[in-house]
Every structure is written in C-alpha cells, then in structure tokens.
Image (tube, rainbow, N blue to C red):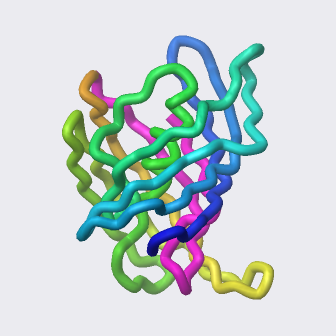
Amino acid sequence: MLNEENVVSVSAELEMGAPLTFAADIKSKVTKVDGKKATVDLSAENFKSSQDGMGGPEKMTFTMDERGMGDNLAAHNAEIVYAVFEVCSVVPGKELKVGDSFKFDYSFADGSLTGEGKLTDVKDVDGKKVAFIEWKGTVVPGGPEIGLSAKSEVDVETGRVTKSKVTV
C-alpha cells in the first residue's frame, strides 16, 4: 500500500572469508505502486556490526514485487544488509499448520533463491499472533552458489516478516 511503512529486525552471521555478524532494523516505505511492483525506500536503523568501522548502508530505493523481493540480489559492501533483508522475505505464501513444510523458488535478474521451510510454532507475542518459520536454501547471486538458513517471525495478520536471523 502506498506510504505504508514497515520495520523488520534483521540479523545475520556470514562467513565470507572472515566471520561477519550484523544486526539492524530495516525500515521500508512504499513510495509508488505500479501493478505488482512497488518502489520502496529502505533505511537501516540501529545498525551494529562485528567488523570495526563498518557503517550501515545509506538509504536506498528498490523496486520490489509482491513477495518483497527486488529485481536482483547483487550487493556490495554495506548493501549486503539490504540483500539479507530481501532473503528474509521468504514466507510460505499459504496457510500452514504447525509442522507443515513449504518450498520456495524465486528468480531474479541476476540469480535465484530456492529451498524448503517449515512452520515450527504459532504464539501470541505482545498481543499479536506470530508464526515461527525456519528454512534452508540456496542463493545464486550471479556467482557461486551459497547455502543459507533462517529463522523468522511472521505477523499472521499481515503476512509480513517482523524479525529474522540469517546464517550463511
């Protein structure tokens, strides 16, 4: 929806030559809607990193589809935070019961994200019904294949991820 704002708490543990961990609250705001695509402004607040001197990414504008996925997954330097945010958008896309599995297969201009997930629990958290999902997958961001996994919390009412931890 136009002018809709959302905040997702994202954290990641990456092993890319050297260990890197980071966490941030990713704020998104839809500024334009065109069919199934939306122009979204992203900014990282409360950014923390294990790498000395690594600052959070600057505010950026992305074109995203109805799944919350952008046109590509390429990320360089601090932009990796936004690539992780996109990967965190994996949700079942259908109603599940606790213990049910789901598969996903997303294609991008520069790669793909495929895998399988499972709904592990549903709980009331701060007055909201929250689904807990775990998934493992493979991302091919225009280069070598990378295995990753995530644990996410999804607001059942909106279907949006509210918190996610990705491990690469």
Residue 102: % across, % down:
33, 69
* Residue at (44% x, 49% y) in the render: 86
Q: Compare residues 19 and 81 and report the one nearer the observer.
A: 81
Number of disc labels: 0
* Residue 164 colored in magenta in the image: yes
Please tell me whether the stretch drawn in magenta is mainly helix, strand or loop.
strand
Residue 115: % across, % down:
32, 53
Q: Compare residues 117 and 157 and report the one nearer the observer.
A: 157
Residue 52: % across, % down:
76, 14
Which image quarter: residue 163?
bottom right
Q: Compare residues 157 and 3 and report the one nearer the observer.
A: 3
Task: Identify the magenta region.
Answer: 144-168
* Residue at (48% x, 46% y) in the render: 149
* Residue at (46% x, 60% y) in the render: 31
The relative height of residue 33 versus residue 112 in the rendered view (above or below) is: below
Is 73 placed left or right of 50 in the picture? left
Is 109 placed left or right of 104 in the picture? left
Which image quarter: residue 166?
top right
Q: Looking at the figure, which quarter contains the N terminus?
A: bottom left
Residue 53: % across, % down:
75, 15
